[in-house]
Every structure is written in structure tokens, then in C-alpha cells.
Image (tube, helix red, strand yellow):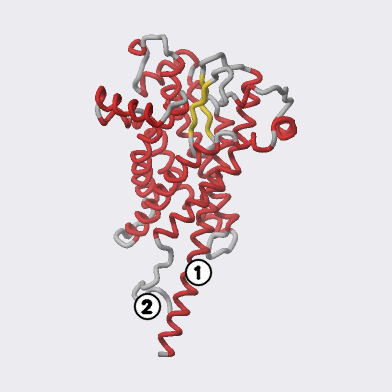
Amino acid sequence: MDAEQTGQAFPRVTPLQQMIASCTGAILTSLMVTPLDVVKIRLQVQNNPYPKRRCFLYCNGLMDHLYFCDEGSNKAWYKKAGRFRGTLDAFLKIIRNEGIKSLWSGLPPTLVMAVPATVIYFTCYDQLSLFMKSKVENEAFIPIFAGIVARLGAVTVISPLELIRTKMQSKALSYKELHLFVRRKLSHDGWISLWRGWSSTVMRDVPFSAMYWYNFEVFKKWLCKNSDKHEPTFVINFAAGAVSGSIASIVTLPFDVVKTQKQTRLWRYEDVDLHNLPTSTWDIMKQIVSKHGISGLFAGLIPRLIKVAPACAIMVSTYEFGKAFFHQQNLKQEYHTSDCMDLK
């Protein structure tokens, strides 16, 4: 007897189970991808040292972090001695000279922000997809719509926390000082100021999400068909996640470049009149093209692919594995309850 015959008394995968699966995926992704970006940043910094009070954007595939180069600050972990000849050499020297924990610099703020954002995003996507499949006959465009709505929701909820986190990273603040900062922000600029940077984030993340989920479902079905599998395996989900993440990363990279410019501009130009600088997405794009050509909009393509492709693959394959695990557990519980009812 299956769930349909028992009136869905035991859901195949509940929202809580989806949250647990996505939370596990976010933690595992952060643990596995963060060392790659730490090494990348260390290699970049030794060739192009950041002057005092300058900042750079660090991203491990799940979350962006703004770091500041204040000498003597405990945030200047990348300034420690060491000359690296390549990626493997950097890994070995960091572990030998600074301890293995240095490979996970920046992990705590990632977990604080990425876990709730990922839980909201993946759970909303699955719930919307399930709802639409019961209402719509043509399922081809469901991943696009569900991906857009889920990403909009996640970005909107997390955006104020992102602003506060960025402020906390820029300067050591007590909770009282942070409270005063938020109150001053609200009194001067209103509630809408807490969502500053929302539009550029949406322009990058929403198209990424739409393309990612559509391509993921297409590649997953194609791989299942060509490998004679009725259900996607962990390897199939991993491969589909990596390919779809790579495609979405390439297409949306110009918006990621603009978002990086907006996030770092406030801190890089503290003593400059910001009113003279372009602020809209399109104006910043035109400025980049005029200075660096079209290729300027695709700066950092390889590092982004190195981060995002494995992050997407690990995240979605872990999430799907978690759902499959809970699915089996729910079926066992369902069959056990059904047998008990038959005995009665």
C-alpha cells in the first residue's frame, strides 16, 4: 500500500525534512568549498597586496564576505608570511605554517548567513514545484518559475541581515553600537535602506536560479535516460548540478561583477564623493565596458567556476540524497503502520 492509497497520511518528504536536508547540504558545501577560496585569495594577495583600509570580496560559492585590510587586525589572516608557487604548494604551506584551521577562515559568518538562506531557498523551491505539479499539466517551465520565486523570497528575507553582517565585518562593534547603527539607518533613510543592494543581488541570483533549476532538471533526466536509471543517483545529481551551475555562472557573471563593485565601493572610496560615481547597474556596466571592454564584465570567470560549480554540485546532490533518505524512512514507517492496521 502506498501513500496515495492511505490518503497521504505519511508525506513522502515533509517540509521539515527538506529543511534538514538543505541545512546539511549547506554545512557540507561550506566545509568543502571554503578551503578552495581561502587558497585562491592567498594566491591573489601575494601577487597584488591590498593596501591598508582596502577591502576585497571573498566568496566560497554560497555566501559573499567583505574583508578589510587593517594592519594588526585579526581579520588580516591572509597577510601571514609565506610565498606560494601554486595551489598545492599553498595548501601544504598553510597547513604546515598556520595550522589546518586556517583553510576555513571566514566559515562562521558563512554558516550564520548561508544556512538560513539555503533552507528558505531549497524548501520554497520544492514546495512550489510540488504545488504547481498538481495544478499545471505542462511541467517543463515549473523549475524556472519555482526557482525565481524561491530565490526572490530568500534574497528578500536575508538582505537586511547581509547589511548588518557587512557592517560588523567592517569594524568591531558592540551590540549596543550595532543597535545604534540600525536605528540611525532607519531614522535617516527609512526601512527600505535595510534592503540596499537588493536589486543587484536579485539581478544576479534570480536569473541564475531560473537557469540553474531548469538545466538541472533537463540534465538529470537526460543522464537517467542514458544510464538506464529510473531514479537519479548521487553521481547523476552531482554531475547535473555541476554542469547547470557552470552554465548559470557564465551567463550571470556580468551581474556578479556589478554586485562586487557595489559592495566594495562604499569602503574603497570613503574619502570620495560617492554622488559622482555611477550607482545603477547599467551605468556601472557601461563604466566597466568603457574602461576594460566587454571582457571586463567577465572578470574572474575561472575562479567563479572553480567555486560555484563544485558548490552547486555538492549542495544539490547532498540535498537530493537527504530527501531520498527521508523518503525511504517515511515509506518504512508507512508500511509498518499499514501492517499494524491490518493486524487490528
Q: Is residue 68 left or right of residue 286?
A: right
Between the residue at mark 1 and the residue at mark 2, the CA separation in whole angstroms equals 18 Å
Residue 144 badge? none
Relative image position of residue 296 (x, y in whole percent): 50, 20
| Residue pictured at 60% horizontal, 43% vertical | 32
Picture layout, residue 32 above or below residue 82: below
Residue 174 in percent (x, y) is at: 42, 29
* Of residues 18 and 207, the one drawn nearer to the viewer in this rendering: 18
Using the rendered view, name the quadrant where residue 305 is placed. top right
Of 41 and 210, nearer the camera is 41
Give percent across and percent down for residue 226.
58, 58
Tell me which residue sits at (39%, 59%) in the image. 15
Residue indicated by mark 2: 5
Element type at mark 1: helix
Which class describes the residues within 10 Å of circle 2: few (<14), some (14-19), or many (20+)?
Answer: few
Is the residue 317 above or below the residue 167 in the image?
below
The three-letter code of the residue at mark 1 reads Gln
User: Picture coordinates of residue 117 (x, y %)?
Assistant: 42, 43
Residue topped by disc 1: 329
Q: Is residue 158 above or below residue 196?
A: below
Image quadrant occupied by the N terminus: bottom left
Residue at 38%, 26% in the rendered image: 177
Q: Along the horizontal axis of the image, is 80 left or right of 182? A: right
- Which quadrant is home to the C terminus? bottom left
Q: Nearer the viewer, mark 1 or mark 2?
A: 1
Please, what secondary structure does the residue beneath circle 2 have? loop
Q: Earlier in the sequence, mark 1 or mark 2?
A: 2
Q: Quadrant of residue 44?
A: top right
- The reply to whether callout 1 and callout 2 are in contact (CB within 8 Å) is no
Q: Residues within 10 Å of mark 1 (few under 14, many from 20)?
A: few
Dot 2 amino acid type: Gln
